[in-house]
Image (cartoon, rainbow, N blue to C red):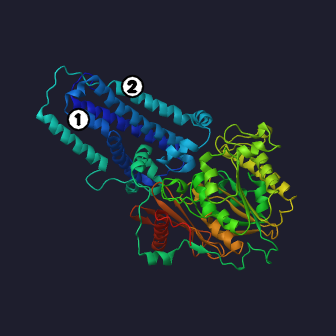
């Protein structure tokens, strides 16, 4: 490297080349750390990934470092003054270190969300819990990302110090420096745009690889930058509105009368049915014996497996990979089909219709129990907006006279067993009918266990497995206590998850498998075991409940009632692509995959058209605040 030269252009070239190489090093770290998730298909895709990294890497370098480039190209004498040099170096180091840190963080974080960091990270850091405790834990548990990320950053800083621009004692503005300014800016904008074509978009990464491998081509820094300054939503006009309405309409009305279904008891209930909705943190189908045909000796969920023998078991699917996305989809029927969670986007309504909104109209008492800190992910505010009468979090649990200091895991909140017992006690004070929604926390990183259970549940392939086994045991005690309550027999229990956890085998790492969650419905008045191959996504719960309770309410839901549709489907937003998984019409046990990335669609043409209709309705409704049907 030129240590003593005073050629600005050579100096600038070295600085940009160093930034580019450091980013590629972080991309390699990201891929190695998540190699079990990404499986490029042959040499052709590998070549595409390498070329895509060059295109997106250069676009990131020239976009993020644009202020630094402009300062170094300006042919003014101040360029050689100390304050100017400090300013330019600051505009080089600070933003680029953010890019490197973001990609390094994604090396560990991606396995949980399957999404690159975006502008939503700034909201997340502000309301995601005790970061002072979580960050040291992450640094220990994901030491490989931390250690190798630090090595890359240190190497970047050392090499950067070896790049010097020698001081000029005299300076004259020559005409060729003005030409250099113009030429340098043209080159900069060329790489920022990704070539001579239209401005490179995040979805363009799919030109170089399969959509599911986009994170290996793009990078977190570019993703954050582009989502900071772009509108969160864009209108979709794939077809006429009449055609979209014909293919799919989110305006749902309950049937309001009994319909034959094995989920429904043969005779009408004598009084309104209570609802207990149990949402387990990070509970993927992969951890359940019921969904993997495991024996009692192998399963991590012996109690739920036994309960499934008396329940209706569906092919559950999540609409997202983050808790705030999953909880919103379950309670409101609205998925998140953008980088920012729907409830945090600028297009949201101040109030949203959801399960508690509907049940409140019919005299239900509605409560949301959350085993974590009040205010985490703004769940308390979301619950208030969708009409829950009560939100009960860590504060309320600690005020209970039976709570103990040892019930707290010192990170996220209350261990599942004591919290579920608290849920039973408090629910028993409600006037029937009621809706009790409970969201557990123990099966969340850092995967803690109470002292009395340490060593009883073994980790296996991943530490989450011991927490799943503990959660299952906690549910055993929950149902044992709930059976003693007078409201138990007249209650419908729904057990599902906010999203799936880390995938541990290839089957659970593809477009379909990585979003599989349990969906178990238990009715004590009709305890018949049944396996239904239909896909039931989180947004199906709202319309299905309205039909199950025989209400004729109107709601907006981007799902369907399991009574009214024989074929199931699921939709989610990945890394700048939309995916729909649906039951194959000829064999429901097989699933069709439909992917839409930019203008490119993959899958059956009719499914692509249906997916486009759903997306058009979604963006039309969300952007125009039409999420409460009149």
Q: Is residue 211 above or below residue 126?
A: below
**Residue shown at 39% from the left, 25% from the top:** 158
Disc 1, disc 2: CB below 8 Å? no
Q: Indicate which label's residue lies in the foreground, 1 or 2.
A: 1
Q: Nearer the viewer, residue 394 or 560?
A: 394
Asked if residue 181 is positioned above or below residue 427 in the image, the reply reads above
Q: Residues within 10 Å of mark 1 (few under 14, many from 20)?
A: many
Regarding residue 505, the answer to whether it shows in the image is no
Element at badge 2? helix
Instruction: Examine the rendered structure and indicate whether residue 29 appears above or below residue 150.
Output: below
Residue 189 in the figure: left or right of residue 567: left
For this orientation, the residue located farthest to the left is: 175
Whether 578 is drawn above or below 255: the answer is: above
> Considering the image in quadrants, where does the N terminus appear?
top left
Quadrant for the C terminus in the image: bottom right
x%, y% of residue 561?
63, 72
Q: Is residue 361 left or right of residue 425?
A: left
**Res. 481 image quadrant:** bottom right
Q: Residue at x 71, y 65 (%)?
A: 313
Residue 337, image x, y percentages: 50, 59
Q: Position of residue 540 (x, y in %)?
A: 62, 67
**Quadrant in which residue 237 is drawn:** bottom left
As drawn, which residue projects farthest toward the top? 169
Give whichever of 401, 225 is nearer the camera.
401
Q: Nearer the viewer, residue 578 or 490?
A: 490
Per the image, the residue denoted by label 2 is 158
Q: Position of residue 198 (x, y in %)?
A: 29, 56
Q: Residue 73, labelled with which disc?
A: 1
Report, in whole angstroms, how far the alpha carbon at label 1 lies from the one at label 2. 24 Å
Q: Secondary structure at mark 1?
A: helix
């Amino acid at each position: 490297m030129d240590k003593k030269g005073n050629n600005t252009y050579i100096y600038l070239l070295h600085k940009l080349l160093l930034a580019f190489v450091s980013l590629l090093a972080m991309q390699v770290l990201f891929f190695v750390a998540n190699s079990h998730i990404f499986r490029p298909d042959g040499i052709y895709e590998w070549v595409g990934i390498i070329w895509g990294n060059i295109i997106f890497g250069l676009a990131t370098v020239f976009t993020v470092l644009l202020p630094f480039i402009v300062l170094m190209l300006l042919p003014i004498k101040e360029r050689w003054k100390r304050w100017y040099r400090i300013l330019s170096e600051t505009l080089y180091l600070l933003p680029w270190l953010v890019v490197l840190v973001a990609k390094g963080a994604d090396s560990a974080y991606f396995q949980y969300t399957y999404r690159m960091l975006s502008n939503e990270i700034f909201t997340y850091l502000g309301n995601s819990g005790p970061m002072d405790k979580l960050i040291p834990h992450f640094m220990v548990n994901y030491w490989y990302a931390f250690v190798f990320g630090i090595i890359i950053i240190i190497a970047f800083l050392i090499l950067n110090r070896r790049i010097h621009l020698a001081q000029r004692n005299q300076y004259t503005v020559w005409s060729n420096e003005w030409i250099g300014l113009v030429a340098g800016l043209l080159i900069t904008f060329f790489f920022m745009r990704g070539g001579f074509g239209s401005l490179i978009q995040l979805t363009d990464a799919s030109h170089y690889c399969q959509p599911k491998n986009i994170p290996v081509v793009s990078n977190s820094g570019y993703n954050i930058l582009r989502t900071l300054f772009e509108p969160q939503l864009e209108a979709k006009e794939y077809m006429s509105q009449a055609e979209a309405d014909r293919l799919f309409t989110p305006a749902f009305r309950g049937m309001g009368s009994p319909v034959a279904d094995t989920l429904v008891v043969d005779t009408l209930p004598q009084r309104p049915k209570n609802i207990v909705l149990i949402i387990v943190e990070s509970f993927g189908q992969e951890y359940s014996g019921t969904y993997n045909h495991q024996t009692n000796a192998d399963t991590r969920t012996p109690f739920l497996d036994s309960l499934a023998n008396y329940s209706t078991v569906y092919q559950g699917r999540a609409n997202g990979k983050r808790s705030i996305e999953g909880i919103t989809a379950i309670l409101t029927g609205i998925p998140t089909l953008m980088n920012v969670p729907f409830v945090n986007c600028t297009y949201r309504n101040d109030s949203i219709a959801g399960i508690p909104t509907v049940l409140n109209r019919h005299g239900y008492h509605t409560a949301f129990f959350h085993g974590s800190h009040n205010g985490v992910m703004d769940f308390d505010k979301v619950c208030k907006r969708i009409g829950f009468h009560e939100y009960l979090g860590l504060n309320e649990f600690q005020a209970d006279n039976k709570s103990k200091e040892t019930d707290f895991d010192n990170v996220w909140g209350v261990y599942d067993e004591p919290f579920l017992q608290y849920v039973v006690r408090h629910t028993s004070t409600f006037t029937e009918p009621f809706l009790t929604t409970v969201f557990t926390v123990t099966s969340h990183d850092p995967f803690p266990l109470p002292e009395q259970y340490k060593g009883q549940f073994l980790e296996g392939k991943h530490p989450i497995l011991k927490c799943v086994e503990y959660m299952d045991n906690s549910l055993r005690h929950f149902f044992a206590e709930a059976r003693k309550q007078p409201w138990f027999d007249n209650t419908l229990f729904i057990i599902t998850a906010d999203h799936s956890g880390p995938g541990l085998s290839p089957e659970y790492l593809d477009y379909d498998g990585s979003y599989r969650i349990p969906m178990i419905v238990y009715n004590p008045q009709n305890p018949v075991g049944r396996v239904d191959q239909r896909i039931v996504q989180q947004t199906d719960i709202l319309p299905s409940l309205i039909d199950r309770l025989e209400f004729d309410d109107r709601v907006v839901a981007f799902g369907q009632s399991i009574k009214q549709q024989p074929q199931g489907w699921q939709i989610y937003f990945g890394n700048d692509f939309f995916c729909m998984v649906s039951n194959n019409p000829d064999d429901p046990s097989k699933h069709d995959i439909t992917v839409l990335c930019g203008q490119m669609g993959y899958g059956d043409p009719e499914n692509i058209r249906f997916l486009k209709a759903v997306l058009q309705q979604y963006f039309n409704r969300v952007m125009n605040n039409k999420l409460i049907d009149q």
